[in-house]
Amino acid sequence: MTKFALSEQLWLMKSEPDVYGWDDLVAEGEGTWDGVRNHLAARNLRTMQVGDLAFFYHSNIGKEIVGIAQISAGGLTDPTDPEGKWAAVKVKPLAKLAAPVTLATIKATEALAAMDLLRLSRLSVSAVRPDEWALILEMAGGTI
């Protein structure tokens, strides 16, 4: 189903595409995921390990999962935080999904009802369970 080995932890990271979208990450080759000011999202960032995979989700505009990124550096202090309290990671783009998976489609899929994306809708960095990951990949066309 995927050409990437699943990591121990799977994630979903939200970004507004008009601020920093999938194409921006691809153009950079590697980006710093910073600016997160929610304690649970920051804890998720601190939990991330090099090699973990994350869905890249366009929020506000599009509201869809568009790609897969990989954590390339973890345990960073957010460079935008002058007090040094918040976490950051570096991410690299791995693959664009064959077909984006929209929020509406996810909401309409009973097997995804417990997904953090739906339960904690304002959370910008959330965990994804392996069964949710596999189903979303299938919904995206099965291959990337």
Image: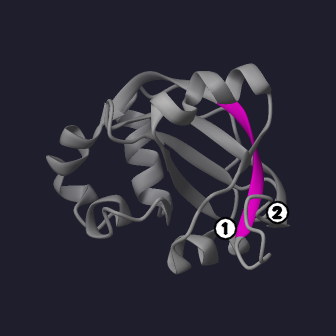
Please tell me whether residue 72 is drawn above or below residue 137 in the rendered image: below
Q: Which amino acid does label 2 sit on?
A: Gly
Contact (Cβ within 8 Å) of mark 1 with mark 2: yes
Please tell me whether residue 10 is drawn above or below residue 16 in the rendered image: below
Rendered location of residue 118, percent (x, y): 27, 61
Tell whether 4 sits left or right of 2.
right
Q: Main secondary structure of the magenta part?
A: strand
Looking at the rendering, in which quadrant would you find the C terminus? Answer: top right
The residue under label 2 is 74
Residue name at image x 42 percent, y 65 percent: 123
Residue name at image x 53 percent, y 51 percent: 13
The residue under label 1 is 45
| Magenta span contains residue 92 | yes
Q: Which of marks 1 and 2 is nearer the N terminus?
A: 1
Tell whether 20 sits left or right of 121.
right
Please tell me whether residue 38 is drawn above or below residue 32 in the rendered image: below
Q: Is mark 1 on a helix, strand or loop?
A: helix
Q: Can residue 41 be seen in this view?
A: yes
Colour scheme employed for the rendering of this structure:
one colour
- Mark 2: few, some, or many residues within 10 Å (few <14, many ≥20)? many
Q: Can residue 144 be seen in this view?
A: no
| Magenta span contains residue 31 | no
